[in-house]
């Protein structure tokens, strides 16, 4: 059973930066796709970035967000720069086996979520 612990959210002004972290335990980290989703009030959960052998970014964050992973520490990061008010959401770390998917329903494991609020 994989467990994910995500952290790093907070309140930041527009144009600022945050780094989210997610540490995994209980599984073979290298075989999992690690993704960051976000969900704003009244909106569907959307994939922001994901990584395993390939990297996926949503169009809305390309050039501003960077996903990376530390295999030794079983940790995945999301560096968020040039933040905008529309980036405000609860951000969730998620994992699934082998292949990147943009569908939240296809991820098997989830962190508890961390709030990111960007003020204008």
Image (cartoon, rainbow, N blue to C red):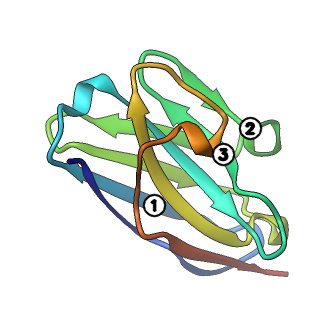
Q: Quadrant of residue 110?
A: bottom left
Residue 74 relative to residue 52: left or right: left
User: Which element type, helix, strand or loop, lies under badge 3?
Assistant: strand
Up the image or down, 78 lies above or below 27; here it is below
Q: Give the quarter of the image for residue 96.
A: top left
Image point (75%, 70%), residue name: 40
Residue 28, numbered label: none
Q: Which element is circle 1 on? A: strand
Task: Find residue 6 and report its horizontal and vertical position in percent.
Answer: 38, 64
- Mark 3 or mark 2, earlier in chain: 3
Q: Is residue 70 left or right of residue 46?
A: left
Closer to the camera, 106 or 53?
A: 106
Is the residue marked by circle 2 packed among few (<14), some (14-19), or many (20+) residues within 10 Å?
few
Tell me the CA gap for discs 3 and 1: 12 Å
Quadrant of the drawing holding the C terminus: bottom right
From where the camera sits, is residue 15 visible? yes
Give residue 20's mark.
1
Q: Answer yes or no: do the residues labelled 3 and 2 have beta carbons within 8 Å?
A: yes
- Check disc 2 and report its element: helix, strand or loop: loop
Q: Which badge, 2 or 1, comes first in the chain's sequence? A: 1
Mark seen at residue 58:
2
Q: Residue at x 25, y 26 (%)?
A: 30
Q: CA distance from mark 3 to mark 2?
A: 5 Å
Residue 103 image point, x, y percent = 66, 38
Label 3 crowd bin: few (<14), some (14–19), many (20+), radius 10 Å = many
Q: Is residue 33 left or right of residue 75?
A: right
Name the residue at 42% across, 24% down: 52
Alpha carbon separation for disc pair 2 and 1: 17 Å
Task: Name the residue located 50 percent from the left edge and 50 percent from the top edge.
Answer: 78
The reply to whether the C-beta atoms of the residues labelled 2 and 1 are less than 8 Å apart is no
Q: Which residue is mark 3?
A: 48
């Amino acid at each position: 059973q994989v467990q994910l612990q995500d952290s790093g959210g907070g309140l930041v002004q527009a144009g600022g930066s945050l780094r989210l972290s997610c540490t995994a335990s209980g599984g073979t980290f290298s075989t999992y796709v690690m993704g960051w989703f976000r969900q704003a009030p009244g909106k569907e959960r959307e994939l922001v970035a994901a990584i395993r052998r390939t990297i996926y970014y949503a169009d809305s964050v390309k050039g501003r967000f960077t996903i990376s992973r530390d295999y030794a520490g079983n940790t995945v990061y999301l560096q968020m720069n040039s933040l905008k008010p529309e980036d405000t959401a609860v951000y969730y770390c998620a994992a699934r086996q082998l292949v990147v998917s943009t569908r939240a329903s296809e991820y098997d494991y989830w962190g508890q979520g961390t709030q990111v609020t960007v003020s204008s």
